[in-house]
Amino acid sequence: MNLDTLRNAEFGQLNQAITAWNGVVTKLKALETAARDDLKAKADKANWAGVNATVTRGFVTKTAGEFADAHAQAKTIHDILKDTRDELQGYKEELDQVLARGLKKNLTVTSTGDGGFTVTMNIHPDRAAKGHAVPDHSQQDMEHLRDDVARILGRATDSDDSAARVLRAVVDQAEYGFSGAEYKDRDTAADALKKAEEAAKLIAEKGDEMSPEEFQRLNSTLALYKNDPLFQEKFATTLGPRRTLEFWSDLSSPDSPNELSRTQLNQLGEFQKNLGLVLGGATQSDSPAMRSWENDMVKLGSERFTSRHGDAYGFQIMSNLMRTGDYDDRFLNKYGNELVAMEKKMRLPDRYYLMEPVPKMNFIGDAEFGRDPMTGFMTALSNSPGAATEFFNATKPQDNAQWVLADRPSFDDSPLKDGPNEALDATGRALFAAVSGVSDPKAPGVEFPPHSPEHREAMKRTLGILAGTGNDFPAEFRDDMALAMGNHGDWVHKAMSAPLVEHELNSGELMEVSKQIARNKNAYTELVGQMHGAITADIYTEKAHPEDSLDRAGRTVGFLEEARYQATNDEKGEKLTDASWEKVGRYHIFGGLVTPWHPAGDAAQRVVDAVTSKMLEDEQARINAQATSDHTKTYQNRRQELQSLADIWYTQNEKWAEDPTHEGYSKGHGTYAQIEAAANDGNKKAEGVSGNQ
C-alpha cells in the first residue's frame, strides 16, 4: 500500500460492504435456525418410508447443513472485513499524526512515481515569509519520520494483503456452495496459513534430517491445527503429494541421519495420527490446488518409493496416513479403485508387498508393520461411511466388494503378535459402515440414519459374496456381519421368517452366513441378540395383524437355531465350530445396540438382554455336555426362549388375543403352541435352504 492510498483513504464503500455482510449474517443465522430447529427437526421425527425416508430426509439434512455453512462463511467474511477496516483506519489515523508531527518540524512526506516516498523540508528557510521563523529539524528527525511512515505503510500493506489472501483462501475451500470455514478474525486465519507454509517448508527442506527439537515443534503445530481447514489445505498443497510420501517413507526408516525413528519413537504414532488428520481434512477442500493434489496422489500410488531401508509402493505409504482423519468420499473411491486395480494386476499373493528388507511404516500401535495398504484404506473407509457404501457397491472398473471380501489373499502383517488379521479386521469395520452409514455402532450417542437404497444394495451384495465363501468365510467378519444383519434386522427378520423361500434377501445366503457366524459363540451371541431386538420391534409395531408377528418370531428363532446346530454339531459332518464354543463363559449382551436402530425402546432392550442371555447359557450347557444330532434334544432347549418371546407378544396384544374371534392365542397355552409350531417351520425352512432335509 503506497502513501497516497492510505493518506487519502475513504472507508465509505468498505463500511457499506461490512453493513451489508452483517445483514447477510443476520438473515442466514435466522435461516440456519429455522432449517435446524424446524425443517430438520420435523424431518428427523417424521415417520417416512420408502423414497421419503431416504431422498427427502437426506435433502433436508443436506440443506440444513448448507445454511449452517453459509452462515459460518458469511460471518467469517464479515469479521475479516471489519477487522481489516478497523486496522486500516487505525493506520490512517497514525499516519496523519506522524505527518502532522513532521510538519511541526518543517518536514513533509511526498510520494514518488515508483510507489515509494521521500522526506523533504516543507519550506526552505530561504523561502520563508519575512519575519516567519521556520522550525528546525535534525537529520535524525528526518530518519525517524521516514522510518515511522515506512513502518505504518508496511503494516497497512500486510493487513490489506493478508485480508485478501485469507478471503480468497476461505472462498476457495468450496467450489460450489459454502465451505463452513469459520474464523473469529483475520489474524487467526492468516496465522493458520503462515504456520502451514512454515511446516511444509520444514519438511520439504529438511525431511527426516530435521532435528528432534524441530520434529517436536512440527508435531505440536500439526496437533494444534489438525482441525483448521485453511491450515490443512495450505499445508497439503504446499508440501505436495510426492514430498509427503517421500517424507513418511524416509521418516519411517530406522537409519535416518538424526535417528528420529529411534529418538522420537514414542512420538511417531501421535505424529502419524496428527498428519493423517491434517491430510484428511485437506481433502475436504474443493480448491483447484487440492483437487490436483488428490489426482496426483492416486497416480503415485503404484509408484515405488525407495528409502534408505527398503522400497514401498505409494499406496503402502499413504494408506498408513489414512488411518486417522475424515477423507473426502470422492478421493477415497478414486484411491480405492486404483488400489484394487493395481492389486489385481499384481496377481497377489505373488508378492504380498513383502519387500526385503521390510520397512515399518505404521506406528499406531506396536504390532502391525503397515505393509498391507488395504488395512489403512479400509480404516479410512470405516471412518467415511458414505465412501464405504459407494466402494462396496462399485462393480466398475472392477467389483471391489468381491475382491476385498472374498478373492483377495491376506498375509500376516504383525508376525510378532498373534491375533486377527488386521486387514480383514479393518475390512469388516468398513463393511459395517457401508451397509449402515455408521462408523462405530458402539460409540456413545451414535445415531443411525435411515437406510438408503444404496445401504440395502450393499447389504445384499455383501451377503451374497460372503455366502459364496462357504467355510472359507473369514473369522474376522463374523462379528461385523452379525452387527450388519442386526442393523438391517427388520429386513433380515422378514427374510428368515418368510413362509416361502423367495424374498429380497436370499434365504440360502442368510442361512450360510448365519451358520458361519454361529461358529463363534461371541459372534452368535451378537447375532441372536440383534435378531431378538428385531423380533421385539416387530411385536411392538405390528398392529394390523398381531398374529403375524408371533408367527415370524417363532420362524426366525427356528432359522437361527438350525444355523447354530449345523455349525456346532460334531456329528453333522465336518466340525465347523471354533474353540469358543468349548469354553465355559457367561454371555454378555451389548446393551444399547438394539435400541438405536429398532423402535422397540429401552423396555424391550431389557427384555431382549434377558431372553438372549438365558437362551445362550442353556445352549452353552448343552454343547459343553455333548454334541448331538438329535434335533429333539436340541429343540427342547429353546422352550424358555420361545416362552419369553410369547410372553412379550401377549403383553402387547392381550386384548386382541382374548377376543373370542381369535382362537388359539390364550396366555397359558395358545401363544406357546403357536410360536412353537412356527419355530418348527423355521427349522424345516432352514434345513431346506441349506440342503439338509
Image: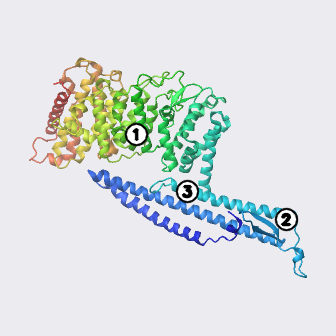
Q: Residues within 10 Å of mark 1 (few under 14, many from 20)?
A: few
Query: Measured along the vertical axis of the image, is residue 319 above or below residue 69?
Result: above
Q: Residue 15, can we see it?
A: yes
The answer to which of marks 3 and 2 sits earlier in the sequence is 2
Amino acid type at image mark 3? Arg
Q: CA distance from mark 2 to mark 1?
A: 72 Å
Q: Nearer the viewer, residue 547 or 21?
A: 21
The answer to which of marks 3 and 1 sits earlier in the sequence is 3
- Residue 282 bears which disc, if any? none
Q: Give x and y (percent) for residue 213.
A: 68, 37
Amino acid type at image mark 2? Asp
Please, which residue is most extreme toward the bottom here?
130
The answer to which of marks 2 and 1 sits earlier in the sequence is 2
Amino acid type at image mark 1? Lys
Q: Residue 324, can we see it?
A: no
In the displayed structure image, the side of residue 172 where residue 606 appears, left or right: left
The residue where tag 2 is placed is 141
In the displayed structure image, the side of residue 633 where residue 164 appears, left or right: right
Q: Nearer the viewer, mark 3 or mark 1?
A: 3
Q: CA distance from mark 3 to mark 1?
A: 41 Å
Q: Nearer the viewer, residue 127 or 574?
A: 127
* Quarter of image, res 461: top left
Q: Residues within 10 Å of mark 3 (few under 14, many from 20)?
A: few
- Residue 168 bears which disc, if any? 3
The residue where tag 1 is placed is 442
